[in-house]
Amino acid sequence: MKLGTMLVVVAVLVALVPGVTSAGGAFDRETLSGLKGVAVVVEPPVKTLELQRLPAETLQADVEKRLRKSRIPILTVEKAEDPPGKPCLYVTVNAKTTSGDTMVYSIDVALKQEVRLTRNGILLHGATTWSTRTLGISDDTNRIRNALVSIVGSFCDDYEATNPK
């Protein structure tokens, strides 16, 4: 990547940091109502040097720990087939080294469920009903992990708001 292009990308990302945007409005939040838990799927990170320091297993453990903190049941992928909607929280973390150890990263978290269209009854598999994303710059993988936990915290807040104990 040319230096000029990289500087523009970095400038845009800096303007976005912390850059968390959430689809977690009232409608999206309501799609969490009645969930009995969620399965968690962490997409394996791109096999680049910077993400070898953040294996999917570490990210999966971070996500599950945050869900447990909010007492949200974690379903195995097989068990997620049982409850209505087959809810699954998908996590994707990508990063690219810009210079030295500095990484530009993106984190996407999306709840996917089965939904049925009211106009014709067609069942859609894996429809995204809640999602959020963040972009950032860091030279510290712990900062990326903390950003992920924060995003999952947004999901937990919305889940708890629609599923009071």
Image (cartoon, rainbow, N blue to C red):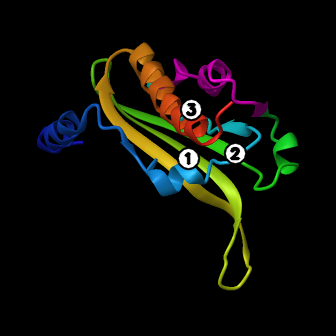
Q: Residue at x 69, y 55 (%)?
A: 113
Q: Vertically, is 119 above or below 147?
A: below
Q: Position of residue 120 (x, y in %)?
A: 70, 85
Q: CA distance from mark 1 to mark 2?
A: 8 Å
Secondary structure category for the residue under label 2: strand
Q: Is residue 78 visible?
A: no
Kind of residue sitting beneath label 2: Cys
- Magenta-drawn stretch contains 73: yes
Viewer-proximal residue among 148 and 164:
164
Which residues fall within the magenta stretch? 51-74
Residue where numbered disc 1 is placed: 110
Q: Residue at x 65, y 39 (%)?
A: 163
Secondary structure category for the residue under label 1: strand
Q: Vertically, is 73 above or below 131?
A: above
Q: Residue at x 74, y 38 (%)?
A: 37
Q: CA distance from mark 1 to mark 3?
A: 12 Å
Residue where numbered disc 2 is placed: 88
Labelled pair 3, 2 in contact (Cβ < 8 Å): no
Viewer-proximal residue among 93 and 25:
25
Comes first in the chain, label 3 or label 2? 2
Kind of residue sitting beneath label 3: Cys
Q: Is residue 81 visible?
A: yes
Comes first in the chain, label 1 or label 3? 1
Q: Residue at x 45, y 26 (%)?
A: 150
Kind of residue sitting beneath label 1: Ala
Viewer-proximal residue among 156 and 142:
156
Q: Say which quadrant the N terminus sits in.
A: top left
On the picture, is 56 further left or further right than 50? right
On the picture, is 45 further left or further right than 11? right
Residue where numbered disc 3 is placed: 156
Q: Position of residue 59 (x, y in %)?
A: 59, 24
Q: Main secondary structure of the magenta part?
A: helix
